Amino acid sequence: MPNDRGSWGSRPGFILAATGSAVGLGNIWGFPTQVGQGGGAAFVLIYLVAVIFICAPILLGEVLVGRYAQLGPAGAVRRIAPTGPWWVIGLLAVAAGTFILSFYAVIAGWTVQYLWLAVTDGLASDARGSGELFDALSANGSQNILFTGLFIGLTAWCVNRGIRRGIEAASRLMMPLLFVLLVILAIRSVTLPGAGEGLAYYLRPDLSQALNPEIIGAAVGQAFFSLSLGMGALITYGSYLHRSHAVRSASMAIVGIDTTIALLAGFIIFPAGFSIAGFDPTASGPGLIFAVLPQLFATLPGGLLFGAAFFLLLSVAAFTSTISLLEVPVAHAIDQWRWPRRKAVLAVGAFTFAFSIPSVLSFGGGFFSELPAVGGTFFNLMVNVWNEWALPVGGMLISLFIGWRWGARFAGDELRRDGPGFPSPALWGFLIRFVSPTAIFLLIVFRFVG
Ligand code: TRP
């Protein structure tokens, strides 16, 4: 066992770090954007069903695998199943961590620039100004390459130091602050004149949309992404737990907090958006929160402060997520190839930065903004491949691996170590053996034919 890999100081430390991984741009930027593009409340409904029945069992499963094996995904899979095709789980994990980081860091770079704008009073306060500001900012290739690189560099620096101190402390301080701020903003947003229309859009599902395979696919992909599932991030974080740490309630807490924060973000964006004349959630795309929120801040006393605090916390939420993305390939190199941490961080960091450039140049008419072969931007291609395909496929493989290869008996024994509680090993075993993999499989088939 390499001593270099480290461990959490405590069970709350693990919960904070795992929640820090889960809560990020996926919740505050991705979720409202997807709701806007995916038909409003129908998307929300499918999302919640996916979280409860498909994702929560897999999340608990990932943590259990990590705690049991005390290794990252590739090592854990090999320890449990030395033969067979299951090694693809490890491969997928390393690839997904690296590539997701490459486009995630682009958005994270925007949040830092918005933080700067808020601090220097450079945010626009009306709809046109906000939209134009976003278009100009996202089209500025060299500046975005700089901030993306900066973000990856900071992430690399922190992962290189070992995650325990910096990240546990940062999460402990920032997560509660983020939550309080989001609640305040949500209250302001739902009490704006004209907010009702936004609430209806967000909460009243159009059920004809709920059976659209594309929307179902996007919702399930979003749920995986938001919970950091399907690529062994939680196997990795679980592997830094002591075997005596109970994980059932911790897993529930991670799922609950992550989902609450995503829902809260919707309560902020949609009422505020619809209170602005001519707002079209479908057309807004990736600029949605960047164009809407500054206008909301402008309605608040001390709006500047709110704006600065919001973008600071959003940057930090993104940071605790990029750390977990980078940690997966880094842990792999440490566990499997015996690389020193520093070398692993440098290699993965440099590769990710290089690969982030086409994602940066996907906006504002940049070189990669119209790829005929994929019918969209490079960035969209990445989101599609990794969020909507790789993570669900990874999740399906992980659930099959846990339920059938590790086996209901052994996996259940690992859960029984924690004593009685919810879910019982029988319920969890049923969900992870039958419900999760079947649902994901059907989804994949539907999307192929659909
Ligand atoms: N869950 C994070 C978010 O919502 C992103 C993230 C971090 C992630 N680590 C991950 C997504 C691992 C998938 C897998 O922003």
Image (cartoon, helix red, strand yellow):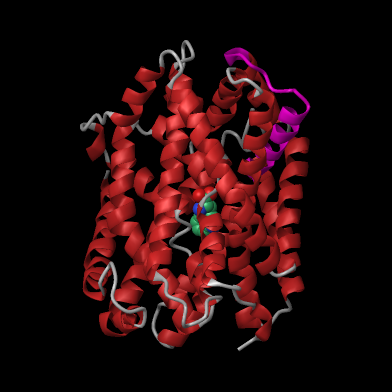
Q: Is residue 225 left or right of residue 424?
A: right
> Which residue is painted at 38% across and 22% down in the image?
198
Question: Picture coordinates of residue 332 (x, y %)?
Answer: 60, 74
Quadrant containing the C terminus is top left
Q: Main secondary structure of the magenta part?
A: helix
Is any atom of residue 348 visible in this view? yes
Residue numbers of the magenta segment = 106-128
Q: Is residue 435 left or right of residue 25?
A: left
Residue in front for this viewpoint, 423 or 97: 423
> Where, by quadrant of the figure, is residue 391 drawn?
bottom left
Q: Is residue 27 left or right of residue 116?
A: left
Residue in front for this viewpoint, 126 or 249: 249
Q: Is residue 32 magenta?
A: no
Q: Name the outermost residue toward the top.
A: 277
Determine whether 176 is above or below 404 in the image: above
Question: Picture coordinates of residue 306 (x, y %)?
Answer: 64, 30
